[in-house]
Amino acid sequence: MPEKIISMGEEKMSKTIEALKKELALLRTGRANPSVLNNIMVPYYGVPSPLNQIASISVPEAQQIVIKPFDKSILKDIEKAIQLADLNLVPQNDGVVVRINFPVLTEQRRKDLVKELKGLAENSKIAIRNIRREVNDQLKKLEKDSVISEDDLKRYNEKSQKATDKFIENVDAVAKDKEKQIMEI
């Protein structure tokens, strides 16, 4: 039972890191990254559809994304959806494809992005620590109900702390990698 509680806690912690990675993918680094467009929905025959399912998205240059819809009649809808997504991107429709040029980031903007990145990383660390607290509370309840001994409780709490430390190091590594991408010119 205690092993199951700890493994469920580790599973939640790994999901926290996956969520952080998804959030960081949306953080612009000055390079064209198609994942910035992942959450954009375009009305296609009255049904909101993900952009990547109704168009091919490519990165021909480091600073540009090209979106080529499978049906040219939705070019204007794609352009409008990108503008409404509030990503600070300016789509350019040339009648065949939609191009998005990414401006080079200024030093101040890079610093602001790093600050935002550190905030996201800290929120993930807090979430991981909260998961540890939940696990420890469940273990204390087992000890209180005489399912495990006090020594077992201590041993399981140490396991829980080791898992927490491992996942927090993982958050730091992911954040450091993203910071390096942002600060790269």
Image: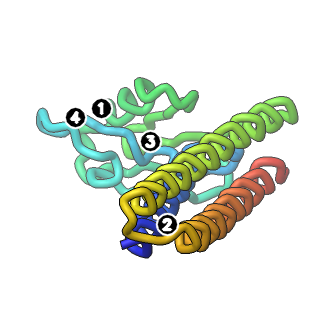
* Whether label 4 touches label 2, CB < 8 Å: no
- Label 3, label 1: how far apart the Cα atoms are: 11 Å
Q: At 50% across and 63% down in the image, what residue appears?
A: 14
**Badge number at residue 29:** none
Which mark, residue 77? 1
Which residue is denoted by mark 4 in the rendering?
43
* Lateral position of residue 57 relative to residue 181, left or right: left
Question: What's under tag 1, amino acid-wise?
Answer: Asp
- Establish if 144 lies above or below 166: above
Q: Quadrant of residue 90?
A: top right
Q: Badge 2: few (under 14), some or many (20 or more) residues near its Cα, within 10 Å?
A: many
Q: CA distance from mark 2 to mark 3?
A: 43 Å
* Spatial separation of the CA atoms under disc 2 and disc 1: 42 Å
Residue 81, visible in the rendered structure: yes
Whole-percent x and y of residue 92? Answer: 50, 34
- Please tell me which of labels 4 and 2 falls first in the chain: 2
> Residue 134 placed where, x, y %?
47, 50
Q: Nearer the viewer, mark 2 or mark 1?
A: 2
Q: Nearer the viewer, residue 6 or 89?
A: 6
At label 2, which amino acid type do we have? Glu
Dot 3: within a 10 Å radius of its alpha carbon, few (fewer than 14), some, or many (20 or more) residues?
A: many
- Specify which label sits upstream in the sequence, 3 or 1: 1
Which of label 3 and label 4 is nearer to you? 4
* Mark 3 or 1: the one toward you: 1
- The local secondary structure at tag 2 comes to helix
Q: Nearer the viewer, residue 1 or 91?
A: 1
Considering only order in the chain, which callout, 3 or 2, is on the residue closer to the N terminus? 2
Q: Where does residue 136 sit, x and y in percent of width and height? A: 52, 56
Which residue is identified by label 3? 98
Disc 3 element: strand
Q: Amino acid at mark 3?
A: Val
List x then y, in percent, for residue 71. 23, 48
